[in-house]
Amino acid sequence: MSHSAEARTPIVEVENLIKTYGAIQALKGISLKFYPGEIHGLVGANGAGKSTLVRSLAGLEHPDSGEILVHGVPTVVQNPSAASKLKFAFIHQELNLVKTFTAAQNIMLGSNSPENKILGNFRRVPPVVKKVAQRIGITFPLDKIAGELSVHQQWLVSIARALVNESELIVMDEPTGSLDAEESSRLLQVCKDLASEGVAVVFISHRLDEVIEICGRATVFRDGAVSAHLGRSDLTRERLIMGIVGRAVAPGEGRGSQDFSKNRIALDVQGLTRGRSVKGANLQLREGEMLGIAGLVGAGRTELARMIFGADQPDAGSMTLFGQSYAPRSVSDGMAHAVAYVPEERRAEALFLHLSISSNLHAASWQRRSSWRMPWVSQRRTVQDAQKICQDLGVVMRADGAKQPISALSGGNQQKVVIGRWLQTAPRILVLDEPTRGVDVGARADIYSRIREIVATGMSVIVISSEFEELLECDRVAVMSSGTIVGDLVADNVTVSNMLALCYA
Amino acid sequence: MLAQIAPVSTKMTMTGKETRAPEAVNRRVLAFFARYGTLLVLAAMIVGFGVASPNAFLTERNLVNVLNQSALLAIVAGGLTIVLVAGQFDLSFGNVLGLTGILAVGLHQSGLPSGLAVLLSLAAAAVVGLVNGLLVSALRVNAIVATLATSTFVLGINFWYSNGAPITLTAGDFTSIARGNLFGIPMPIVIELVFLAVLWALLNRTVVGHHAQAVGANQVAARLAGVNVGRVTVVAFMIGAVAAGIAGIVLSARIGSAQVTAGDGYLLGAFAACFLGASVLRDGEFHILGTFVGVLIVTVATNGFAILGAPSFAQYLVQGAILAGAVALSTTSRRILGQTKR
């Protein structure tokens, strides 16, 4: 959807924006323009400055210097409501919908439309909502409760809300982050339609293929500065990665060519079933093997992993662990059998955001740290050990960093800390669920090389990922679809197209 | 308020720096006050009262007296801090304070040795904490409702056991708990400092303390890290209740009698102290040292106004204002520091 946007006047023009927090320069003079009718990609590592820029436009941050011009007029965006009066809309990954309201109510929420001023029938769907819904192809009933909608549908509701407010600039942060391939492509189509109607869409994503597919232009951030402005013709994966990392990264380098079929079976899963999400899954993991589980969102991978860990219990089926029957009744039971699980939703399920890095690192192993069978832990040793583990895992932080809150770290470093937490429990089996979600490209490669190091110690590792390219790192890949394992790929058969083929088979 | 959108006139050549600089300073000042403001309030009050009545307030005897007065509140608030750190809420400790006072005095009066009377009443307090914890963790009752219910239940027991009348000691060695000295330091202060030290160590140096912090920070993550969330919750409520129980015993020993309404003033005071403490040096987290500072602020305010001859209603006005101010300070600090973190 490349338009000759340059001819038009930009909706928003950012000139030399600078923002510093203490000693850290978050924005080092950013300049860019958003034109009507274009899809503009923003890519870059976490902490590269994308979100600070967006927060400045949203009125959540106030830049130290530089200008924001809206339709050519220098403007100070004081606060979020000022941003919405400027007809900017921001849709974040968390999707701030009121779960107990209907889709229509959510769409009308905060709207200045006269429809909103009357306390009418709550189930009534205003005509303006119907019109917008039609425009972006909402087919589900608008009086459905938002909490019952799928993530894809919730995105459509959020976009509809932006359109009811007649937004001219819509910023979407990782819109396809938790969607499956088909839903993603439908959402991308909506983006294209919006752009063709003259809306400026700002598309923030780690999924470079999608950026390449739909964006007319892209701006790449690195360390608070713009490292590349890419037009349609030079928008390639290589250029994007060069811009993000500053060097080229080749995927799949760490792949071993070892044959594991003679190794002892570490974990044998037979006919595991739970609810409607997992239906008779069979899986074998061999000692020292790195097994990938591919699948689309909703295939039941997380649910399977949680049963292996003991966080949920199966309705049917059985497991054996190194030849012993294994039926964990709880997380601590799973841990007692030396099984570890790094969950998918890092912020919600793994991090203690305002606790220190050290506390986050030791969260699963305080019991092990206690001395003389007493519930007593040494603060000095705890912090020293944390410091050392962080060093070993390559966590980038201040020298005395283990005491600072984990919220000060980037997503990739936070993930390393969570992995470190489980390494301290000396697991025999480590399950990593979407280990690179919300992690930038450079740190992704790093995390996989750490996983490789862990596997090299003889541990058996399962990696669940929706980024099939990352699974090329694995020794073997099992593909899960609709609650069962539908295929097993080894050696040369481990390719993205094979994984996709099995997913859609 | 300012106009929300302020298109800058194109004629005025304004660099961003000129428009932003005052605000940056403003933020830094605000952040400073958020972090150290509570300590400044304490310092300002001590200086203020000291200047207002140097002969009465700033005497060694009165300062020891302030510490002595702070003892009960510090013990209660220390226990409440553990409950708050674990992410829970407790409204029952006021009546638990009354319960242990009545039980200890009543049992001692009826012939039990003081040690046994104290142990039995503390056990009763622990049972209340256990019930609170089980209601909240096993039966998933909202903590406010659960502890309000147990509080009412305990109040019923208090009235039942005491017939609503104060129980006065006529004999026995019970009062020595609060009226004695250790190395010249009044016993309540000794108990206060030792108890706070124990709670601090428990929270920061033991497995259960770290688990409590984890549960309070993110219950789902704590569960997935293998922490027994239910057990930690129960332990936190029991510590809170036993703390209130200790305070109840010290109080009744100090005044030589016990009554149903003994705990009334401590509910608000303890919450005020904990929330004030949450903004001491940290961005909105509860911690023992902070709670101690909060307790001192509440006590100094009460003591100072009493010395100045302010009427007793002023004490409530001041406590209420302090609590609101504390919460505002704590949330503001969290917001400001949260913003600068990104």
Image: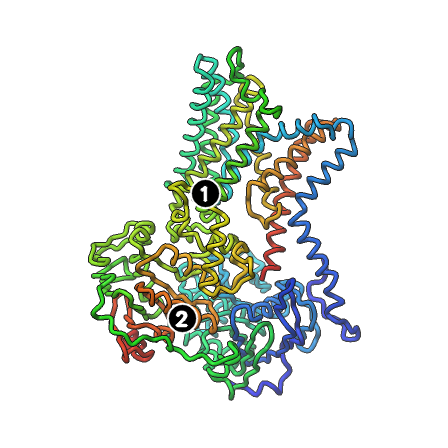
The residue nearer to you, when weighing A401 against B32, is A401
Vertical placement of residue A259 versus A417, above or below: below
Residue A15 at what x, y percent from top left?
A: 67, 76
Q: Residue furthest top?
A: B170
Instruction: Please state if A79 lies on the left or on the right of B262 as rendered.
Output: right
Chain on which label 1 sits: B
| Residue A423 visible within the image | yes
Question: Which SS class for mark 2?
Answer: helix
How many tags in the picture?
2
Q: In the rendered image, which residue does mark 2 sit on?
A: A449
Q: In the rendered image, which residue does mark 1 sit on?
A: B206
Which residue shows up at 66% across the image and 67% down it? A63
Q: Amino acid at mark 2?
A: Ser
Crowding near pointer 2: few (<14 within 10 Å), some, many (20+)? some
Vertical placement of residue A476 versus B315, above or below: below
Residue A79 at what x, y percent from top left?
A: 64, 62
Which residue shows up at 34% across the image and 62% down it? A431
Q: Amino acid at mark 1?
A: Thr
The residue nearer to you, when weighing B251 against B141, is B251
Which residue shows up at 57% across the image and 63% down it? A111
Are the residues tagged 1 and 2 within 8 Å (C-beta)?
A: no
Crowding near pointer 1: few (<14 within 10 Å), some, many (20+)? many
Instruction: Please state if A47 lies on the left or on the right of B318 as rendered.
Output: left
Are dots 1 and 2 on a single chain? no
Instruction: Please state if B51 lies on the left or on the right of B251 as rendered.
Output: right
Residue B127 at what x, y percent from top left?
A: 41, 30
